[in-house]
Image: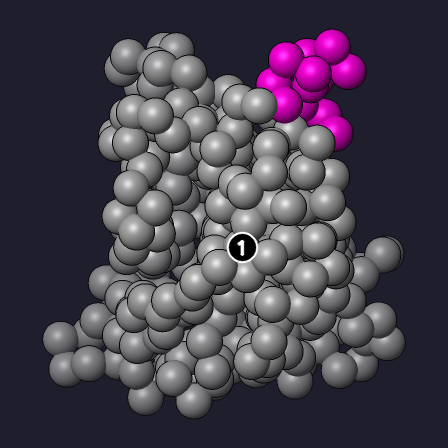
Amino acid sequence: MTPTLVRQHLPHAGTTPQVDQWARARDWAEIQERMLVPLYEAVYERLEVGSSSRLLGLGCGSGLALLMATARGASVTGLQAHAPERLALARERLLPGAWGTRACAGARLTDGGPADIGDAAAAATTTATYNLVTAFEPVGCVAGDCEGLAEALTAAAPLVGPGVPVVLVGWGPPERCATSSVLQLATKLANPLRDGAGRWRPALRDDLEEVAGRAGLRPDGSGRVACPFGYADTDNAVRGLMSTGLFDAAVAATDPAQVDKEVREALHPHRRRDGTVWMPNVFRYLIARTV
């Protein structure tokens, strides 16, 4: 919980908690982002992503899903808005000189949304380029995330042709996602804030179909993938969950120490004898196609 595992959101105006954004981005990339690797693999396998794939990744986070696609031979373009630290980490992974490694062929990263890829001339030459669009940031977790994703997909439509698969991802039913009980704290502790934007909410059955409909896409298959959240210890779990940004409003409404204490208490039932934390979850993906 990406993008990449929950949607990056802007905290309530005037109440933004003071956090080290670079440290948080590192926690996201090193701890939390990997939790959806089984989902990425399942989607890429089903759609036979390979050397002929030209992928446009919306909300690419720190680039792990893109890196996995390039390992299969795909050329990738990643878009990420409102998270420059995560995008910088994606550049380290994918662009020339990253950690002294060779650049991923054809990789391109942009700070912003589909409209920021390039000018009209560049967009015109790119129109028929992308034959796969992914939105791996799970919806059905933050109030208002469906609306934001539908807008991004609509903006991306001019960059792809008809019949192109678009992959949407969402949380599974709360009763099948052990992490739901921990995320509920984000709403409980943030209740003093009036603005409900960015709050956790339970996933709804038709979240993905609703987004596809708003964006003018035609559903064409779906699947479910087990994505357990596993952490080395409680400290590691707290860092990973806090890196999602979901608890920002709770921290602003109370204080970091209280949020930290309550998150640790909520994690206690998921702590195993060896000290590791294990929370089984199920995520759902929808394959829709442009018309």
Q: Residue at x 44, y 20 (%)?
A: 107
Give the secondary structure at mark 1. strand
> Which residue, given by chain and number where applicable, does mark 1 sit on?
288
Q: In the picture shown, does residue 265 fall above or below 230?
A: below
Residue at image point 51% right, 66% down: 170
Residue drawn at (57%, 23%) of the image:
128
The picture quadrant where one finds residue 255 is bottom right
| Badge 1 amino acid | Ala
- x and y percentages locating residue 123 in the rendered image: 69, 18
Q: Considering depth in this image, is 93 or 288 the residue closer to the camera?
A: 288
- Residue stretch rendered in magenta on the structure: 115-127
Circle 1 packing at 10 Å, graded few (<14), some (14-19), many (20+), is many
- Please tell me which residue is depicted at 44% across the width and 27% down the height of the picture: 54
- Rendering colour mode: one colour
Magenta run includes residue 105: no
Residue 124 counted in the magenta span: yes
> Where's residue 264, x and y in %?
42, 78
Task: Please give left or right for residue 11 compared with residue 170 in the image.
Answer: right
Give how far across and how far down residue 275 sits, in percent.
20, 74
Q: Look at the image and tell me whether residue 24 can be seen.
A: no
Q: Is residue 81 left or right of residue 151?
A: left
Horizontal side of 141 relative to 195 (left or right) equals left
